[in-house]
Amino acid sequence: MKPVLRDWAELLRVSALFTVPGDALAGAAAAGLRPNRRTALAVGSSLCLYEAGMALNDWADRDEDAVDRPHRPIPSGRVKPAAALAAAAGLTGAGLALAYRAGRPAGLVATALAGTVWAYDLRLKHTPAGPAAMATARSLDLLLGATATAGRVTKHPLLPATALGAHTYAVTTVSRNETQGGAAGAPLAALAGALALGALTARRSTAAPTAARMPSPAGPALPRPSALLPGARTRVRGGSPVAPSDVARAGLAAVYVATAAKPYFHATLNPSPPLTQRAVGGGIKAMIPLQAALAARSGHFRTAAALTTLIPVARKLARKVSPT
């Protein structure tokens, strides 16, 4: 990678970029729909707004980073402050344009998302409202995918959006101590939250109108052929049926918990800056398995499987460019 490209990749946290598409895809799954052209527009909008937030974040924190992180692109002089601000503005405009192409409801959600991102970076980041603002942004990103895919606002994605927001709230709270360390309460609370979210995502949703449950125009939905095949369900002790889908949900939930919980646990035992930074990085990496688990919880296992392919790519890139 050329030096200039590497500088911008570091500024925009490209290794964390792979955590973004899953918001829209999990939102589409929560709405009970397969991804479509409008979902792709929502993904593009999310990517632009996320990167706008990264550029704006470093522009707003350039004086603070000059003291705590002088190696960052702006304080080190590798990226000019004006260029970072211009990139943030341009990416925001592009994100809004893509969202409005998916329809006015999606555009309005994206406008709220963009407003939240700018408010967080410019005003709320260092206030008590900071973690809540970041959580709101991530929840809105999932709702953007759901609204764009469905063409309207629906209530079914509210619980998955809240779950994603809760995870984001925990990561943001931990990140507030990543340069100084010394606070075990935040990673401990994040650890408890990860365990609770793991239990939630392991359970099958009864609210989302998945394709398997929606009536067809010709009449009631018929059982899937695979459900009539021998071995489609496995009997376990006590005679309770266990479907392969139950195993898939539990497996994805376990991957999420394992990714997030281990660094949180280490930071709880020793809240030093290096371990706190690892906890933040682990929380960011856990976004993808959480999105996959939420999609599986809604009954969209192909979407969940597609999202899992992003996990090794994100981890490999994180070794070259820090996600924090």
Image: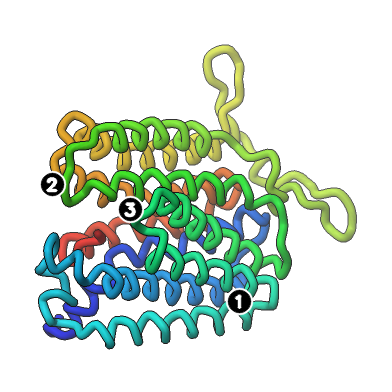
- In the rendered image, which quarter is residue 316 located in? bottom left
CB within 8 Å, label 3 to label 2 = no
Using the image, determine if residue 320 lies above or below residue 297: below
What type is the residue that disc 1 sits on? Arg
Q: Earlier in the sequence, mark 2 or mark 1?
A: 1
Q: Secondary structure at mark 2?
A: helix
- Residue 37 numbered mark, or none: 1
- Horizontal side of 36 relative to 311 (left or right) equals right
- Residue 284 numbered mark, or none: 3
- Per the image, the residue denoted by label 2 is 274
Q: Residue at x 40, y 36 (%)?
A: 194
Few, some or many residues within 10 Å of mark 3 (<14, 14–19, 20+): many
Q: Secondary structure at mark 3?
A: helix
Q: Nearer the viewer, mark 2 or mark 1?
A: 2
Few, some or many residues within 10 Å of mark 2 (<14, 14–19, 20+): some
Q: Is residue 91 visible?
A: yes
The number of callouts visible is 3
- What x and y, as percent, mark residue 106? 64, 71
Q: Residue at x 14, y 74 (%)?
A: 75
